[in-house]
Image: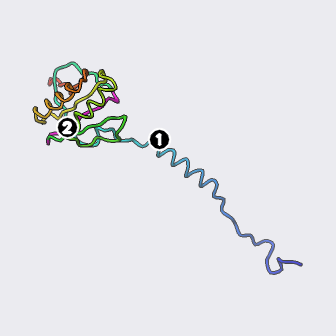
Amino acid sequence: MNFNQGKDKRSYLGDINVTPLIDMMFILLIFLMISTTFKTPEQSFTMKLPTAGKTEVTVVKGAPTVFVTSAGTVLFYNPDQDSKPHPVSLAKLKAAFQQIAANDKKTPVSIRGDASARIQTLVDVINAAYQAGLTQVQLPYTVKQDKK
């Protein structure tokens, strides 16, 4: 029995080999994953730090951070627990500070206040940190540039 009676032996339906296409898609995916920049907590919102003299403050990266915006909103970011800063009340912030102090009182905490933030809000946040027993509170700022 000949099943190929009606077909010409020279007619061939070409198949597209998709293996190289899949390889290229994986290469593009890997390239895009590597070249993507991820937002740091500081890039989630706009904040202008106050300026001061010529010496810089050394801030420990990965430390719990409190952000006080110009509108007076207090945001808390703990890199061990949070993926991004979230708004908190002063009572919740005190509880978070107490939890951090229970693990280690020498854990550095960074308090980043906007240059136009209310001083009272910053003082309340600093006071909450000290009341919880934290001893290393950092207040980062930008270095003032000399105008020549």
- The percent position of residue 19, horizontal first and vertical second, equals 64, 55
Q: Quadrant of residue 148?
A: top left
**Along the line of sight, the residue nearer the viewer: 147 or 108:** 108
Q: Comparing marks 2 and 1, which lies closer to the viewer? A: 2
**For mark 2, does the 10 Å Cα neighbourhood hold few (<14), some (14 to 19), or many (20 or more) residues?**
few
The structure residue drawn at horizontal position 29% and vertical position 22%, both measured from the top left corner, is 105
Circle 2 residue: 91
In this picture, is 84 found above or below 112? below
Q: Quadrant of residue 80?
A: top left
Left or right side of 23 for 59: left
The structure residue drawn at horizontal position 26% and vertical position 30%, both measured from the top left corner, is 98
Q: Element type at marker 2?
A: helix
- The percent position of residue 11, horizontal first and vertical second, equals 75, 72
Circle 1 residue: 34
**Along the line of sight, the residue nearer the viewer: 47 or 146:** 47
Magenta stretch, residue numbers = 61-71
